[in-house]
Image (spheres, rainbow, N blue to C red):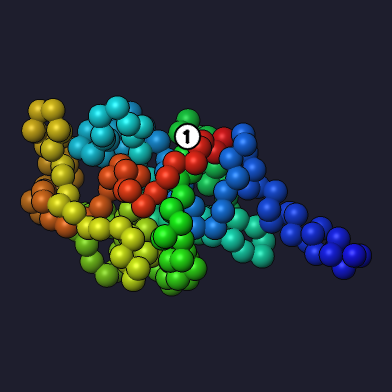
Amino acid sequence: MRRLLLLFALLLPALSPAMAKGVEVREGDLLFVTAGHSGLSAAIDDATARQDSQSFDHVALLASAAEGWQVLHADEKGSRQQSLAAFRQDARAKQRQIVVYRLRAPQQAAIRDAVATARTMLGKPYNTSYVLNEDSYYCSDFIERAFRAHHVFALQPMNFRNPQTGQIAQHWIDLYRGMGLDVPQDQPGTNPNDMSAAPVLQRIGVLE
């Protein structure tokens, strides 16, 4: 009994950040960050937002570690890991919400491999062109690759056009012109909004 109490005490610090506003996170959960209203975030939202759905511009993978919960993701600082506390602090600083999604039961067997794969992808630069390659990743690309061996998420034609107007936002035109590239409309890729709507995921709640 004494040994069990000691084990529980050792685990408690790692597990305590999992609870917030009634949301209990688990390894393998996906953390979707709501979109902003300017710059890159607004451009992503303009092209990929779904009508009557919450809009996201970032997604990350939650993993357990001896020191507590870690968030594995690709952002403007590259493919990296953060503590869950630091990830939440960054979201709060930008006045964003973090919404937790979880794989449905048939896909949960993929989580262990996905976390291990994600750890091997850390340290790569951010993919600013969103054109798939093996040397850099963007957020939903990082997640799709982590689960790719189990075929959890599918690549689909990328869209940079506003669904209402059919026009490509000036942000994308300027971005790709600066790279000497055409806007990669319809090339294979992913985005956080479409990923959040995948039937393999269920929405758990807001982490605050």
The percent position of residue 16, horizontal first and vertical second, equals 70, 48
Occupied quadrant, residue 170 = top left
Residue at numbered disc 1: 97
- Residue beneath the point at 10% across and 28% down: 165
The percent position of residue 66, horizontal first and vertical second, equals 66, 65
Occupied quadrant, residue 189 = bottom left
**Horizontal side of residue 181 vs 67, given as left or right:** left
Task: Note whether residue 22 is visible.
Answer: yes
The percent position of residue 1, horizontal first and vertical second, equals 90, 65
Label 1 Cα neighbours within 10 Å, binned few <14 / some 14-19 / many ≥20: some
- Residue beneath the point at 30% across and 58% down: 153
Front residue of 111/123: it is 111
How many tags in the picture?
A: 1
Which residue of the protein is positioned furthest toward the front in this rendering? 106
Front residue of 108/175: it is 108
Please tell me whether residue 188 is drawn above or below residue 165 in the rendered image.
Answer: below
- Residue beneath the point at 26% across and 35% down: 49
**Horizontal side of residue 5 vs 106, given as left or right:** right
Task: Note whether residue 123 is visible.
Answer: no
Residue type beneath disc 1: Gln
Front residue of 175/15: it is 15
Please tell me whether residue 162 is drawn above or below residue 197 in the rendered image.
Answer: above
The percent position of residue 196, horizontal first and vertical second, equals 35, 44
